[in-house]
């Protein structure tokens, strides 16, 4: 239901965004060269709502209080798409939703956990949604893993969240990759990041293996954290748009296509996830650290290789 509804809604949202002039106009920090409508996450919102409604009609336990938090984040994201919001109200909304999710999961320390996890998940998805297909692929993979964990642990709310997330993002992919006709926008990245955070909190609280839900987005978390730390050490404004994430540098500096970079991130994330599912925690930790470190070092390694090749060519001439 989520897949079908998102697929039907996407062309309608595209027309509306074009008519309203909600366009992502490229600048020197962009990975696209022509204006593309943003706000496509509204189609995903329609899809997840249809999926939740169907689940509720079949008497499944939909965590409506937590879900309402993700809807609020989508509204905040759409407001940002329309004209831009300051960082304070955006962070305030994320913290509020985190507190609500923690309250829904029993209160106490879970409120604090929600106020930490939700902003991290939302901003990681938002910062990493900078090339075609990357978030559609990675969040769809996360949704499938959430479904699997939910089925294995008999946690129906996690199954439902994973299903609607995977269904809506998979349906959106043809509109966003390999050539983007529509961007998720902040409405989409906030919505999907919200569901990722909610799923992680529910999984950690309700299932013994719930923390494996961090694994599918390990590359997202590593890239976001490393980039923020690097910019912070240089004294740069963290909220200013830039093209310094590893995935952006692989496209702009190494010349790798957006589709290949997006595919690389999801393949690495799935290898990390399989290590956590099939191996011991030691195997999971070692695999995660090794793959994330290799990924973070790729731009510099490719630059050195290119420089050596250039020097060899010049020497041969």
Image: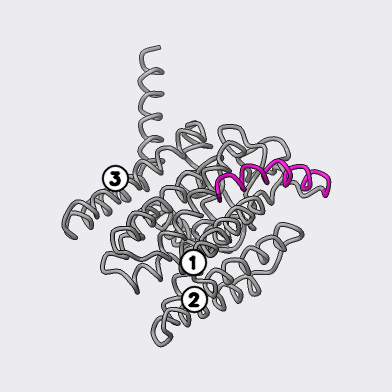
Q: Which callout, 2 or 3, points to the residue nearer the camera?
A: 2
> Which disc is residue 271 wearing?
3
142 and 63: which one is in front?
A: 63
Is residue 181 found inside the magenta-colored segment of the image? no
Percent across and percent down for residue 129 are 55, 50
Magenta stretch?
1-20
| SS at circle 3 | helix
Q: Earlier in the sequence, mark 2 or mark 3?
A: 2
Percent across and percent down for residue 282 are 16, 59
* Disc 2 residue crowd, few under 14, some 14–19, many 20+, Cα 10 Å: many
Q: Main secondary structure of the magenta part?
A: helix
> Which disc is residue 59 wearing?
1
Q: Residue at x 64, y 58 (%)?
A: 187
> Which disc is residue 101 wearing?
2
Q: Residue at x 70, y 66 (%)?
A: 85
Considering every residue shown, the one lying at the far front of the view is: 58
Q: Which callout, 3 or 1, points to the residue nearer the camera?
A: 1
Q: CA distance from mark 2 to mark 1?
A: 21 Å
Considering every residue shown, the one lying at the far bottom of the view is: 108
Q: Earlier in the sequence, mark 2 or mark 1?
A: 1
């Amino acid at each position: 239901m989520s897949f079908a509804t998102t697929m039907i809604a996407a062309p309608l949202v595209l027309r509306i965004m074009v008519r309203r002039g909600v366009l992502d106009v490229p600048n020197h920090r962009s990975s696209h060269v022509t204006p593309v409508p943003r706000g496509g996450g509204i189609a995903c919102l329609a899809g997840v709502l249809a999926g939740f409604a169907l689940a509720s009609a079949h008497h499944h336990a939909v965590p409506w209080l937590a879900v309402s938090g993700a809807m609020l984040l989508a509204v905040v994201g759409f407001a940002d798409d329309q004209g831009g919001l300051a960082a304070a109200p955006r962070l305030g909304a994320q913290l509020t939703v985190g507190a609500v999710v923690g309250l829904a999961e029993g209160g106490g320390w879970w409120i604090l956990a929600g106020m930490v996890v939700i902003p991290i998940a939302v901003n990681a998805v938002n910062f990493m949604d900078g090339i075609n297909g990357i978030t559609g692929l990675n969040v769809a993979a996360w949704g499938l893993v959430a479904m699997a964990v939910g089925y294995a642990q008999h946690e129906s709310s996690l199954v439902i969240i994973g299903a609607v997330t995977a269904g809506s993002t998979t349906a959106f992919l043809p509109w966003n990759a390999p050539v983007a006709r529509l961007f998720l926008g902040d409405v989409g990245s906030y919505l999907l990041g919200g569901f990722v955070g909610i799923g992680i909190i529910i999984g950690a609280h309700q299932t013994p293996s719930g923390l494996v839900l961090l694994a599918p987005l390990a590359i997202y978390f590593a890239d976001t954290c490393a980039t923020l730390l690097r910019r912070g050490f240089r004294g740069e404004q963290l909220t200013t748009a830039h093209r310094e994430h590893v995935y952006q540098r692989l496209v702009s500096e190494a010349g790798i296509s957006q589709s290949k970079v997006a595919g690389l991130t999801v393949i690495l994330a799935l290898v990390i996830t399989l290590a956590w599912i099939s191996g011991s925690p030691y195997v999971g930790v070692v695999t995660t650290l090794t793959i994330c470190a290799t990924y973070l070092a790729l731009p510099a390694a490719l630059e050195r290789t290119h420089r050596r090749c250039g020097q060899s060519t010049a020497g041969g001439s």
